[in-house]
Amino acid sequence: MAPTLTSLLLAYTLGCFSTAYYLVRWRTGEDVRLYGSGNAGATNAARMLGKWAFVVALLGDVGKGVLAVSLAHWLTRGNVWAVGLSVPAVIVGHIWPVQMGFRGGEGFAAAIGALAALDFAFISFVGGTALIVYLISRKRSLAGVVALLVALPLAVYFGWPTGHLLGLVLVIPVMLWAFRRHIRSLFGR
């Protein structure tokens, strides 16, 4: 039980490290959340610092997702429940970081990293689906929502163990909630 709790705490703590927030704070002394979309994410970092900041923030947040799941796997010797629950833990840390007053980013980059570490083929299919939707619609919001909606059926198709499925079941509503503003914009609200 202790390794599982440790892995979840580490995943949340890693999630709390917002690459965009600390990058912008380091370069400008400003809070990235006070500009643009108000989120601590790669797109907002790019608005303030340029395209290079998008790449750095994206890679940093994807990396922390990969690291969180990898550490959970290592600490718990592959316990599927701990590994599966490390996915929502890192994402929740990104969206609601304690040291930033529980105001972080939307969690997509952390989710991509965590899910890629869990099952690279799965995230490739989900990402491919999102890319096709984006190329047809030119709407990132729609692509993100479709990716979330196809994730669970694809995970079942891929034969994920119950512990991993539980992690994904927890991730989807959290991500939809974090993405709610974009979802409303799809319906003209």
Image (tube, grey):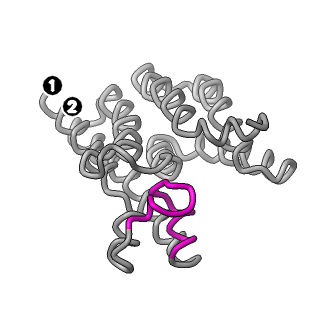
* Residue nearer the viewer, 51 or 71: 51
182 to the left or right of 105: right
Residue 170, position as x, y percentages in the image: 45, 25
Residue 122, position as x, y percentages in the image: 59, 40
The magenta stretch spans residue 37: yes
Judged from this view, the residue extending furthest toward the top is 162
Q: Badge 1 local density, few (<14 within 10 Å), some, or many (20+)? A: few
Q: Amino acid at mark 1?
A: Met
Q: Which residue is mark 1?
A: 1
Q: Is residue 156 above or below residue 183?
A: above
Residue drawn at (31%, 50%) of the image: 16
Magenta residues, start to end? 31-48
Q: Amino acid at mark 2?
A: Thr
Measure how far apart labels 1 and 2 are at the Cα level: 5 Å
Residue 93, position as x, y percentages in the image: 34, 43
- Are the residues flagged by discs 1 and 2 in contact, CB closer than 8 Å? yes
Q: Which numbered disc covers residue 4? A: 2
Residue drawn at (82%, 53%) of the image: 138
In which image quadrant can residue 126 be found? top right
Judged from this view, the residue extending furthest toward the left is 2
- What element does badge 2 sit on? helix
